[in-house]
Image: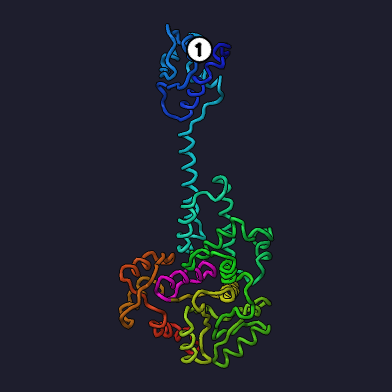
Amino acid sequence: MTVPGRLRAADLKPLWTELHRRFSAGAHVSRVTLRGLDDDQRAALADLLGMDRYPPSTVPVAVARLDAVLLELTGSDTRTVTEEICGPIGDRARDRRNQERERNALWKWLERHPVVTAEPALLGWVADVRRQGLVAASVPSTRALLEQALGVLAALPSDGRPLASFATGVLGDSHALDDGRRLPGLVLRAQAALHGAEPPRDARERRALWESAGVECDALSTTVLVAGLRPLGGGVLARALRLWADAGRACVVTLQQLRDPPDVRLDAPEVWVTENPTVIALAVRRFGDRCPPLVCSSGWPNSAVIELLREIGRSGTALRYHGDFDGEGLRIAAYVMAKTGARPWRMSCGDYLAALDAAPKPHPPPGRVTEAPWDDGLAQALRTHDAAVLEEAVAGALLDDLKAASPTG
C-alpha cells in the first residue's frame, strides 16, 4: 500500500502517534483524543477530515470517520494506514497476558521441581523468591539461574572441600559462588529456609551456612556416630569399624576418614538410621556385640553423616530412617531421605498416632510443621494434635525392631 505524502506530514504526527499507542493496547478503539494541538496541527486535521473550521486544541476523533476518509484516499482502514506510517502495531494486553503466563509457569515449575518436592521446607524459599519477582532480566534467564541454584542444592552437603573447588565441580566455574553474586544468595536463602533460620546477614553467617552444608568445614571435627557396622573391606576404616562392633561399642567416624576410599560394603540387608544418639546408646547397652548396624544423624546431619549413608547405599544396603515426630524432625527426615535414598522407619501417620497415645504426657508442641513427602497425612496430624513425640519416647518399639534384625534375634 502506498500512503499519500500528505498523510505523512509532520502536522499529522500527533494523530498517528496516538492511534498507534491506542491500537497497541490490544483493546477495541472507537475514538482517540488529541491534546495540545498547535495551529498548524489543527489545520492539518481539519483538512484531512474535511472540517469547515479548525478544531479546538483538544479534540476527540472518531475512528469510524477516519476509516471513511482513509478508505477513499488509500483503500485501507485507519489501523492499516497507522501501521504503515508508524510501524507494526503490537498488543500490550496480549504481551502482558503472555508474560504473566510465562511467570506463572516458571513459579509452578520451581514449586514442582524434584529438589523442592523432596524437601517441602523449600516451599518457603520458593514463596520468598516469587514475592521478590524475577531474579534476572527475563523469565528464561531467571529459570537458568534457578536451575543452577537447584543443582547446587542437590549437590549439598559437600565433602568439606573449599567453596571454589565445590563451585568448579558443580558449576564449572570457581567463582560462581563468590560473595556478591545472585546465585550464592539464592542458595544460602534456600539453606536458611531448610533450617528454619533467617537468611544470612553478613559474611560470618554466610560462612556458617556453607560450613553446615559441608563446604570448607573441618574434616576432623565433622563426625558421624555409628554402632554395629562391620564392613567387608580390608581398609583401615573397615577394620577399625569391625573392631568396635565386635567390642560392642559405638564409635565416631570423621569426614577425613571418609575421604579415603572407605569401602563400607556390608553383609547386611539394612542399616538403621536414628536422629538421636540416645537410641544408639540404648541399642549398644541392650545388644552389645550383637548390635545391628546403626548410624545416627545427631539432629541435622552433617556432611560426614550424608557421605557415610551414601556410601552404604551405593553398596546396595537399604537405609531405614527414624526421627522425632515434630516439625524439625519431619524436615530432617525429608532431608536425609532426599540426600541418601533412605526409606522411613516407623515414620507414618499411624505410627505417630500410636506413639502419641503411648508416650508420656504432656506432649511438647511440634513447632513449625512442614509436609512429609513420604506420608500425606502425617504433617496434618501433627498440626491437628499440636503435639510432638520425640524419638526417645518410642525407643522401646525401635529396639524391638532392632532385636528382630540382631544376628541372634
**Quarter occupied by the N terminus:** top right
Identified at 54% across, 85% down, the residue is 227
Q: Is residue 128 left or right of residue 242?
A: left
Based on the picture, tell me whether residue 41 belongs to the magenta stretch: no
Quarter of the image where one finds residue 398: bottom left
Look at 58% across and 66% down and name the residue there.
206
- Identify which residue, 52 or 238, lies in the foreground: 52
How far across and down, in percent of the image, does residue 268 sit? Answer: 55, 80
Q: Is residue 218 left or right of residue 24?
A: right
Residue at the spot of label 1: 44
Vertical arrangement, residue 179 with respect to residue 311, above or below? above
Task: Determine the main secondary structure of the stretch shown in magenta.
Answer: helix
> How far across and down, in percent of the image, does residue 406 sit?
49, 86
Q: What residue type is labelled 1?
A: Ala
Residue range of the region highlighted in magenta in the rendering: 324-346
Classify mark 1: helix, strand or loop: helix
Identified at 46% across, 42% down, the residue is: 100
Location of residue 149 by image quarter: bottom right
